[in-house]
Amino acid sequence: MRSLGSEELELATRYLFLSMALVVLKQDRQYIETGQFKIKDHYLDLLNKMEQLGRQERKKLRYEMTQQKLHVIETSRNDSFTSFLFLAHGYEEKRNYFNPAIRKKVERILFELMHRVYS
């Protein structure tokens, strides 16, 4: 039985996957900074703007989650699945995500951030 409403679940999962996307952006920036790119300023500028937009959105999401007393905690991880515990209104709900599906969701958020930078 689900104990979280669809809006709460959407808010918490967006926060979760956006946080993962920000980690990817940080790692990519480090790879470009230390890599053999001849012209890296444009790539770094794009990544920095994407990260800035992501951080602004995550700050708003975190505020909304705090208002709703909503928390997400990673509970376990293996080669295939990652488990998260969602806490809201005194209820707990455990959800398992297939790791390739997580990758796709994070990739979608990265493309979304890139599109927002260009528009």
Image (cartoon, helix red, strand yellow):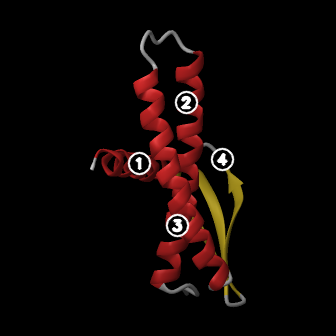
Q: Residue 97, can we see it?
A: no
Whether pointer 1 and pointer 3 mark residues with C-beta atoms closer than 8 Å, the reply is no
Depth check, front residue: 25 or 77: 25
Residue bearing mark 3: 13
Residue bearing mark 4: 78
Please, what is the three-letter code of the amino acid marked with disc 2? Arg
Q: Earlier in the sequence, mark 2 or mark 4?
A: 2
Whether pointer 4 and pointer 3 mark residues with C-beta atoms closer than 8 Å, the reply is no
Residue 50: assigned label: none
Q: Is residue 48 left or right of residue 88?
A: left
Q: Residue 20 location in percent, x, y?
A: 57, 50
Please, what is the three-letter code of the amino acid marked with disc 4? Asn
Residue bearing mark 2: 29
Whether pointer 2 and pointer 1 mark residues with C-beta atoms closer than 8 Å, the reply is no
Query: In front of the other: label 4 or label 1?
Result: 1
Considering the image in quadrants, where does the N terminus appear? bottom right
Residue bearing mark 1: 104
